[in-house]
Amino acid sequence: MAIKQHPVFTNFNQVEHPLLIHKLSLLRKIDTPKKEFRELVSEITSLLAYEVTKDLPLTTKTIQTPFETIEAQVLVDKSPILLAVLRAGLGMVDGFLNILPTAKVAHIGLYRDEKTFKPHFYYFKAPEHSENCQYFVCDIMLATGGSAVATIDYLKKNNINKITLLSILAAPEGVEKLFKTHPDVPIFAVHLDRTLNENAYILPGIGDAGDRLFGTK
């Protein structure tokens, strides 16, 4: 897979691969059924997870093969934290765990005020003593950037500083906001779309990801 870094917002990385491009096109279609939509989100997340975990540190451990004892490389930390932003982020959990099944799953609850578009916090649950773990924040869309910034603000206030954001789609407005507030947090996404509409949805986008995942509209 190829990575294209944004020329201005240098923390934004677009992950490019023919399979990702194809699957995103299917995800965008208005007539894609819920079952297929969920499967596509999971498949895309697996490909993203493969890319964002490429720099996880390794250490050496003695293991026994069927023929001899060797010094083999294994992950230093087999249990990074996957933080699902409720509710759309739930659709990314299984895809990430397909790549790294030993990861632990945390949840953060934020809802958006439909008039101000500002996020409101209501829930957080993560494994105890995980402050020094790598956190992968998963949310299907980075739109206004409000939820992403609120999530990262919360993590940093709790001494969690190893943070990477995974999104399938991003809008320039959200990328810019995150770059200005948390330039140290890398963003990985499949595509940077054109803009936001008057209701703060990404254009051309995929619609409301939560509704399409769970059939709530």
Image: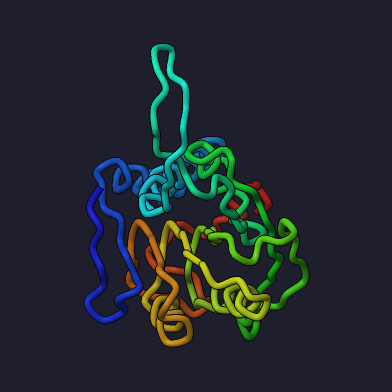
Nearest to the observer: residue 35 or residue 173 = 173
Nearest to the observer: residue 81 or residue 87 = 81
Query: Which residue is found at the position 37% from the left and 64% from the top?
Result: 204
**Count of numbered badges drawn on the protein:** 0
Task: List x then y, in percent, for residue 163.
Answer: 51, 67
Task: List x then y, in percent, for residue 139.
Answer: 54, 60
Nearest to the observer: residue 162 or residue 146 = 162
Please determine whether, in this image, residue 29 is positioned above or below residue 147: above
Query: Which residue is found at the position 49% from the left and 49% from the top?
Result: 76
Please determine whether, in this image, residue 213 is positioned above or below residue 130: above
Residue 173 lies in what quarter of the image?
bottom left
Please determine whether, in this image, residue 97 is positioned above or below residue 84: above
Task: List x then y, in percent, for residue 41.
Answer: 49, 45
Q: Quadrant of the C terminus?
A: bottom right
Query: Which residue is found at the position 55% from the left and 45% from the top?
Result: 78
Q: Would residue 23 appear left or right of 150 to someone viewing this image?
A: left
From where the camera sits, is residue 90 visible? Answer: yes
Nearest to the observer: residue 109 or residue 31 = 109
Q: What colour scheme does the image use?
A: rainbow
Task: List x then y, in percent, for residue 55.
Answer: 37, 54
Please determine whether, in this image, residue 140 is positioned above or below residue 67: below
